[in-house]
Image (tube, rainbow, N blue to C red):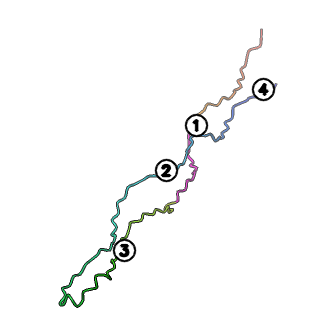
Amino acid sequence: MDVTRSEEELGLTSAWRPVERLRVRKRIVTEQRVVTLELRREELVVDREPLADARATAPDPGTREPLVLTLSEEQAVITKVVVPVERVRVVVDRVTEEHELQTTLRAEQVDVADEPPPA
């Protein structure tokens, strides 16, 4: 007579499952800046000189033309340019950790017992 004895064997595998969902976004942050800039302008300066002989250098009253001058000034001009300043790279890194697992395995045992013959 033959008896087949069986036992459980332990088999281990791993499976990927989603754990977390991430979203990468850029946002614009504004900041106020105060900058001092020197601006130039033209001003009219009148130099007066006394005349020794006022009659000799006096212009003819009929030939006077108005003197027209154009004064200029610098104006502040604000320009903004977007320039790249940093590259951000997102990388998924796989980390390996060891975990202890515990389970119970069952095994069959065969017992042989001697019985006295029936009387």
Name the residue at 77% across, 10% down.
118
Amino acid found under the numbered disc labelled 2: Arg
- Amino acid type shown at disc 4: Val
Pair 4/3: label in front = 3
Residue type at mark 3 is Thr
Tell us which disc is closer to us: 3 or 2. Answer: 3
N-terminal of the two: label 1 or label 4?
Answer: 4
Residue 90: x and y in percent read 55, 53
Which residue lies under the disc numbered 3?
70
For residue 3, which numbered disc appears in the image? Answer: 4
Q: Where is residue 94 in the image (x, y as percent from the top left)?
A: 58, 49
Give the label, 1 or 4, closer to the camera.
Answer: 1
**Could you tell which of marks 2 and 4 lies nearer the N-terminus?**
4
Please report whichever mark, 1 or 2, sits nearer to the chain's N-terminal start: 2
For this view, does 42 lie left or right of residue 92? left
* Picture disc at residue 27: 2
Q: Which is closer to the viewer, label 3 or label 1?
A: 3
